[in-house]
Image (cartoon, coloured by chain):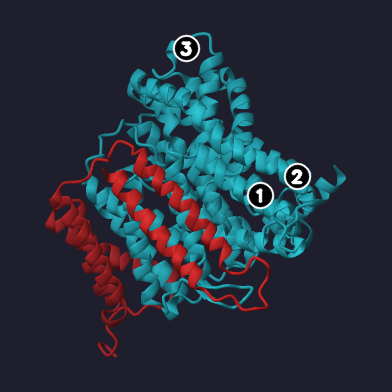
Chain colours: A red, B cyan
């Protein structure tokens, strides 16, 4: 079932990609092949492969339980927050929070996770800042000057 | 021969400069640690370090030396977790678990580690010598390659990768198309037209392959670990004192030589890589052995063969990468990304225009090998300690390093989000057993593949038969066809034997 569904998604994406390629307007001075042909070839090959997946699916993979999927979703949210928090909150705070919560996702042990977060954030900050010379803001700007 | 000597002299004059030597050493230590950490292999290890090596401001030779030392080191280190934990650090080290772990359980962990270390050394050394001899010849042949030949060559790489590297051709093709499709995003270099950007300004320059690589290889690993929830954390075998099993090393000398040769050839084939090298080496040793039943129960030859094989393949995979710009494995694809970001175009011209890069690299590999032998035989006990780093510390660390690395490249939130997206995509692909290496290769080579096809059409004024107009091109097309089709017939045989190996264990 998983293979069939994935195959269908691939067919849809390939068709969309093909349609996108036909919309490209090649300038009249372009080379004989132009900018459309190669993307259209890729889309056609992908279309065939997607059909094969629909017709001859493999054994479905073992999908995780709903609770695990929720944890994976949460981890993604943490990562997105981390990406946005790096600049406004500074490296130390955002890394400690993100690392601690990720660590908790892998091994739910609160104290160890918090220690991991703090340790990683401070340790990596020193490596990045002083060994590699990256310009990182340790603290939110405006805080501590 | 004289030319080779002169080239080597040039190489060593580069490699023996204190700073380069230092970088090679650092690379070896880092690589061994990365290889030994369960869940971190050569390709994701090298991937997360590339952005950081840019921020160090290294020149091309230095960056390449550092990263290939990490690469070789990770190939050595991969065996440590295979033997002690029965968890391969990466795919090529999988075959080492078959006999390495049983040896460790019988209290011969030290023997297995030393023997596999020596086998790694033999394999890596011989393949570096092979690289030295074969690469210049292949570079000369590569001068005959026009756009039609290059197009066929890229096709060959994708076909063999899809044929051999995956259990389901359709899924490998999907992966290749996904990569090629991603490579099409951005401004078309020959007409200046923007393609598939959806009007998003961030996408006009295309998708940075480093973002894709770090996302697909490193971030997806975090998702996999969260799912497994430390389920894989088995209790390892304790490592007692280490002696050098001289008798076993002498007994397996022919095994090591044969496996090195097999591994090197497997590595040179574009798209085949180290996993195939170690697998073929193990199967070959088993099939010529008189007492086949001892394999899988802690047979020294079963430890020496895959280790010599995969390290030889690692060197072999550098041959097509340097001379043709076509990587033979996931890790060499990552190294190709490094070269491209450093503005070095691999190919025949590299050998004539930048000999100091090529020969400096080769000389550093020879030095790195000796360093790695020292690190991996007498000091192996220290490195086996890193196995005790729990996943709950390691994986967040890897994530943070990935974020800072990508952020330091461009300073853009968009790239970080894209990386997370690739991480989620990588998790999904891996669950669906769609291989991720062809995706990377597609992103890396897609642009060049299209350019060579369009150039061929310009030269022939739109005549498609031009693609089959030279002997080299026809041979490449036939090889591509065979590489894609042959595994369909061989698979039944191979999958039966892999299943048997697993059962025998």
Say if labels 1 and 3 share a chain: yes
> Upstream in the sequence, badge 1 or badge 3?
1
> Gap in Å between the C-alphas at discs 2 and 1?
9 Å
Q: Residues within 10 Å of mark 1 (few under 14, many from 20)?
A: many
Asked if the residue under mark 1 is in contact with the one under mark 2, i.e. CB atoms within 8 Å, the reply is yes
| Location of the N terminus of chain B (image quadrant) | top right
Where does label 2 land, which residue? B472
How far apart in space, not on screen, are marks 1 and 3 (Cα)?
41 Å
Residue at mark 3: B292
Q: Residue furthest right?
A: B2
Residue at position x 42%, y 45% in the image: B171
- Looking at the picture, how far across and down is residue B69, in whole percent? 56, 51
**Label 2 secondary element:** helix
Q: Earlier in the sequence, mark 2 or mark 1?
A: 1
Q: CA distance from mark 2 to mark 3?
A: 42 Å
Q: Is residue B277 left or right of residue B105?
A: right
**Subunit of mark 1?**
B
Residue B291 lies, in percent from the top left, at 49, 9
Chain under label 2?
B
- Are there few (<14), some (14-19), or many (20+) residues within 10 Å of tag 2? some
* Callout 2 and callout 3 share a chain: yes
**Secondary structure of the residue carrying numbered label 1:** helix
Q: Residue at x 61, y 33 (%)?
A: B122
Choose top left, top right, bottom left or bottom right for residue B251. top right
- Horizontally, residue B183 falls left or right of residue B241, namely right
- Residue holding disc 1: B152
Mark 2 and mark 3 lie on one chain; the one further toward the N terminus is 3
Q: Nearer the viewer, residue B83 or B280?
A: B280
In front of the other: B326 or B153: B153
Residues at discs 2 and 3 in contact (Cβ within 8 Å): no
Q: Nearer the viewer, mark 2 or mark 3?
A: 2
């Amino acid at each position: 079932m998983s293979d069939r569904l994935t195959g269908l998604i691939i067919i849809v994406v390939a068709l969309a990609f093909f349609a996108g390629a036909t919309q490209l307007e090649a300038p009249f001075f372009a080379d004989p092949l132009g900018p459309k042909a190669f993307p259209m070839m890729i889309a056609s090959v992908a279309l065939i492969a997607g059909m094969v997946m629909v017709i001859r699916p493999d054994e479905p993979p073992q999908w995780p339980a709903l609770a695990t999927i929720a944890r994976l979703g949460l981890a993604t949210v943490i990562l997105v927050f981390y990406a946005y928090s790096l600049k406004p909150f500074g490296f130390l705070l955002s890394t400690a929070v993100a690392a601690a919560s990720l660590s908790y996702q892998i091994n739910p042990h609160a104290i160890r996770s918090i220690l991991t977060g703090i340790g990683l954030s401070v340790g990596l900050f020193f490596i990045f800042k002083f060994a590699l010379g990256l310009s990182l803001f340790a603290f939110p700007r405006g805080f501590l000057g | 021969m004289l030319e080779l000597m002169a080239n080597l002299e040039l190489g060593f004059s580069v490699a023996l400069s204190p700073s380069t030597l230092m970088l090679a050493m650092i690379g070896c230590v880092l690589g061994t640690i990365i290889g030994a950490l369960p869940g971190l292999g050569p390709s994701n290890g090298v991937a997360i370090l590339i952005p950081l090596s840019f921020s160090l401001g290294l020149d091309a030779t230095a960056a390449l030396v550092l990263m290939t030392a990490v690469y070789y080191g990770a190939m050595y280190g991969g065996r440590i977790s295979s033997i002690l934990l029965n968890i391969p650090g990466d795919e090529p080290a999988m075959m080492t678990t078959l006999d390495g772990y049983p040896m460790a359980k019988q209290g011969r962990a030290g023997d297995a580690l030393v023997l596999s270390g020596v086998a790694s050394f033999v394999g890596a050394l011989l393949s570096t010598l092979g690289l030295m001899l074969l690469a210049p010849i292949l570079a000369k042949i590569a001068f005959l390659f026009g756009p039609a030949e290059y197009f066929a060559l890229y096709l060959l790489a994708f076909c063999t990768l899809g044929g051999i590297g995956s259990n389901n051709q359709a899924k490998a093709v999907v992966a290749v198309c996904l990569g090629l499709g991603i490579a099409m995003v951005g401004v078309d270099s020959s007409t200046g037209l923007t393609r598939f950007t959806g009007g998003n300004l961030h996408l006009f320059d295309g998708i940075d392959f480093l973002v894709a690589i770090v996302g697909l290889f490193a971030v997806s690993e975090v998702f996999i670990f969260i799912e497994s929830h430390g389920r894989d954390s088995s209790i390892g075998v304790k490592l007692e004192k280490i002696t050098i099993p001289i008798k076993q090393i002498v007994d397996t000398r022919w095994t090591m030589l044969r496996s090195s040769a097999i591994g090197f050839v497997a590595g040179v084939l574009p798209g085949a890589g180290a996993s195939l090298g170690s697998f073929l080496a193990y199967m070959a040793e088993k099939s010529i052995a008189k007492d086949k039943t001892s394999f899988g129960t802690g047979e020294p030859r079963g430890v020496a063969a895959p280790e010599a094989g995969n390290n030889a393949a690692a060197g072999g995979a550098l041959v097509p990468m340097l001379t043709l710009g076509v990587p033979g494995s996931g890790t060499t694809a990552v190294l190709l990304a490094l070269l491209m970001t450093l503005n070095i175009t691999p190919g025949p011209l590299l050998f004539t225009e930048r000999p100091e890069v090529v020969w400096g690299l080769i000389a550093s590999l020879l030095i790195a090998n000796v360093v790695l032998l020292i690190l991996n035989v007498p000091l192996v006990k220290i490195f086996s300690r890193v196995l005790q780093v729990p996943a709950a510390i390691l994986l967040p660390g890897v994530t943070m390093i990935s974020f800072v690395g990508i952020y330091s490249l461009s300073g853009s939130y968009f790239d970080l989000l894209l990386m997370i997206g690739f991480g989620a995509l990588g998790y999904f692909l891996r669950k669906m057993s769609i291989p991720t290496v062809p995706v990377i290769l597609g992103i890396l080579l897609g642009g060049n593949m299209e350019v060579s096809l369009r150039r061929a059409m310009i030269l022939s004024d739109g005549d498609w038969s031009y693609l089959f107009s030279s002997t080299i091109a026809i041979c490449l097309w036939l090889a591509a066809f065979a590489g894609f089709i042959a595994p369909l017939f061989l698979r039944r045989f191979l999958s039966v034997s892999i299943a048997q190996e697993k059962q025998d264990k």
